[in-house]
């Protein structure tokens, strides 16, 4: 049994196993967890503590992980989403809808980092290039679940911030256009009031 202390210690494979145990038979669930995490040697009290610990860890706020190492290879999130090719977007769209394919999704969004040489490495500190997409990989089943969860939280927050920014921009543009019109002050107020809830 590997020591599990943080979200970085729980693999995607572990997470999928836990997520898929939706049985109402508590004995079956416990048996599967014991087998998956190799907990046969734990006593009952330690097993209960293990379950509590897993639950607490899964409730933690995930960190955004831009780079991580798996099996001695450093992976980085695609640094520029404008460079993603059509076939990659098709695969992203397919795999993001299937919770059982999060390892495949990660293998598209996180790629091996190409090492920079000499002075370029020093000048481009923190920046990196990734290898081309070569298909999805099951090796990401061994990736930490925090990589996936942190990425999802990052994109959710980004989406929320972009929607707020877009809404604010549209409101300012509407106000500018309304001020330019030849409507009376009361008509302008009525127009703005009628747009309330739309913007």
Image: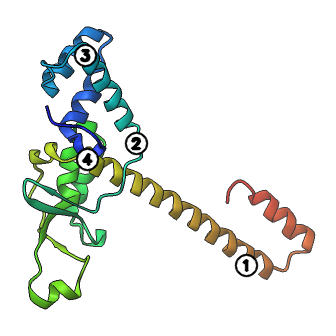
Q: What residue sits right under mark 1 in the picture?
A: 176
**Contact (CB < 8 A) between labels 1 and 3?**
no
The answer to whether the residues at label 2 and label 1 have Cβ atoms under 8 Å apart is no
Colouring of the image: rainbow
The quarter of the displayed image where residue 163 is located:
bottom right
Seen at 25% across and 20% down, the residue is 47
The answer to which of 68 and 25 lies nearer the viewer is 68
- Residues at marks 2 and 4, CA–CA distance in whole angstroms: 11 Å
Bin the neighbour count of mark 2 within 10 Å (Cα to Cα): few under 14, some 14-19, many 20 and up.
Answer: few
Q: Earlier in the sequence, mark 2 or mark 1?
A: 2
| Closer to the eye: label 2 or 1 | 2
**Does residue 88 sit above or below 19 in this rendering?**
below
Would you call the spot at circle 4 few (<14 residues within 10 Å), some (14-19), or many (20 or more)?
some
Res 63 quadrant in image:
bottom left
Residue 8: mark: 4
Q: Earlier in the sequence, mark 4 or mark 3?
A: 4
Marked residue nearer the N-terminal end (3 or 2): 3
Q: Please give the residue where the numbered disc 2 appears in the rendered image.
A: 60
Q: CA–CA distance between discs 1 and 3?
A: 61 Å
Q: Is residue 51 above or below residue 91?
A: above
Instruction: Give the Cα distance between marks 4 and 1.
Output: 49 Å
Question: Residue visible at 33% across and 54% down?
Answer: 151
The numbered mark, 2 or 4, whose residue comes first in the sequence reads 4
Q: Nearer the viewer, mark 3 or mark 2?
A: 2
CB atoms of marks 4 and 3 within 8 Å:
no
Q: Secondary structure at mark 1?
A: helix
């Amino acid at each position: 049994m590997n020591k599990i202390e943080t979200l970085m210690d729980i693999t995607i494979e572990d997470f999928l196993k836990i997520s898929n145990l939706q049985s109402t038979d508590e004995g079956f669930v416990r048996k599967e967890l014991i087998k998956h995490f190799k907990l046969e040697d734990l006593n009952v009290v330690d097993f209960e503590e293990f379950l509590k610990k897993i639950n607490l860890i899964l409730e933690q706020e995930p960190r955004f992980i831009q780079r991580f190492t798996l099996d001695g290879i450093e992976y980085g999130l695609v640094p520029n989403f404008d460079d993603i090719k059509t076939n990659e977007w098709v695969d992203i769209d397919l795999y993001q809808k299937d919770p059982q394919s999060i390892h495949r999704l990660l293998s598209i969004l996180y790629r091996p980092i190409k090492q920079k040489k000499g002075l370029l490495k020093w000048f481009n500190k923190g920046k990196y290039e990734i290898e081309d997409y070569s298909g999805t990989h099951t090796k990401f089943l061994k990736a930490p679940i925090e990589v996936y969860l942190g990425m999802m939280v990052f994109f959710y927050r980004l989406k929320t911030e972009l929607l707020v920014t877009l809404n604010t921009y549209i409101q300012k543009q509407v106000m500018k256009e309304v001020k330019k019109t030849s409507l009376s002050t009361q008509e302008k107020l009525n127009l703005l009031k009628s747009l309330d809830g739309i913007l």
